[in-house]
Amino acid sequence: MTVDLSVTHLILQASVVVQLVMLILLLASIASWAIIIRKRRELKHASEGAERFEDQFWSGGSLADLYTQSEHPDPISGGLERVFRAGFREFNRMRKQGASGDATLQGAQRAMRVALNREVDSLEANVPFLATVGSTSPYIGLFGTVWGIMNAFLALGAMQQATLATVAPGIAEALIATALGLFAAIPAVIAYNRFSHQAERLTNRYEMFVEEFTGILQRNDPTRSSAGA
């Protein structure tokens, strides 16, 4: 007797619980790959945008001219520009209101920190989902495997004569759930580690810029210069 052990046939012949497990893992894998593709593009553009803006910032031009040029930052690559604009806008606003040097500097720093937190949230968006998929998918697949093997042995116990041909399909369909669990988990774990590292590096880069820009504003504040004189 020949037994059809093709993957498609085994999935179609699996129990409802095992099929549900396979569907969950398949959807998790599709969602993970969608996030991986989008997040890879976002982090790459954010890194390139930060490098491009830093080159402009340290080129020695006027901060006011740079503020005007960066009026419409790119939604993906303009993270550092938005941090700069938030700080410079608040610095000018408070200086026009006649605030003291310390208050002006602190206001600009607070504005940059708020903008920085928004950018960090954007960089890390959806990344925790990859960690969830990576940590839970093997266990979900294992549950499907255990359930499938249990059903296979229950069916085996009701038979008068058991052969490998009668046992193999049930065990094979159960093991597909484990394979799908690993298929969903492995790319998710690799992507999570990589994206977390890239997001952390960009966050450190943004924080360093905030500190450097704060120092520049402090040196260029005319109220501080007059106070020091």
Image: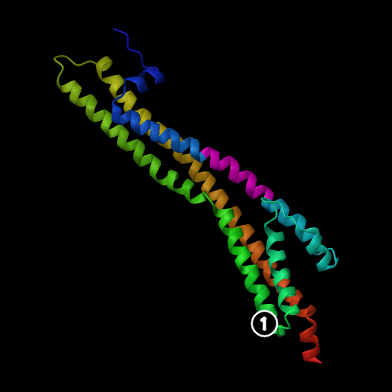
Instruction: Rate crowding at label 1 as few (under 14), some (14 to 19) or many (20 or more) other CA atoms within 10 Å.
Output: some
| Residue 61 percent location from the top left of the image | 86, 65
Residue that carries the numbered disc 1 in the rendered image: 103
Q: Is residue 38 magenta?
A: yes
Q: Quadrant of residue 89?
A: bottom right
The stretch in magenta equals: 33-45
| Residue 37 percent location from the top left of the image | 59, 40
Q: Quadrant of residue 201?
A: bottom right
For this orientation, the residue located farthest to the right is 61
Q: Is residue 16 above or below residue 217?
A: above
| Residue 164 percent location from the top left of the image | 26, 17
For this orientation, the residue located farthest to the bottom is 229
Residue occupying image coordinates x 41% and y 35%: 25
Residue occupying image coordinates x 64% and y 58%: 202
Q: Is residue 207 magenta?
A: no
Q: Check disc 1 and give the amino acid type.
A: Ala
Residue occupying image coordinates x 76% and y 86%: 224
In-image side of 156 versus 29 (left or right): left
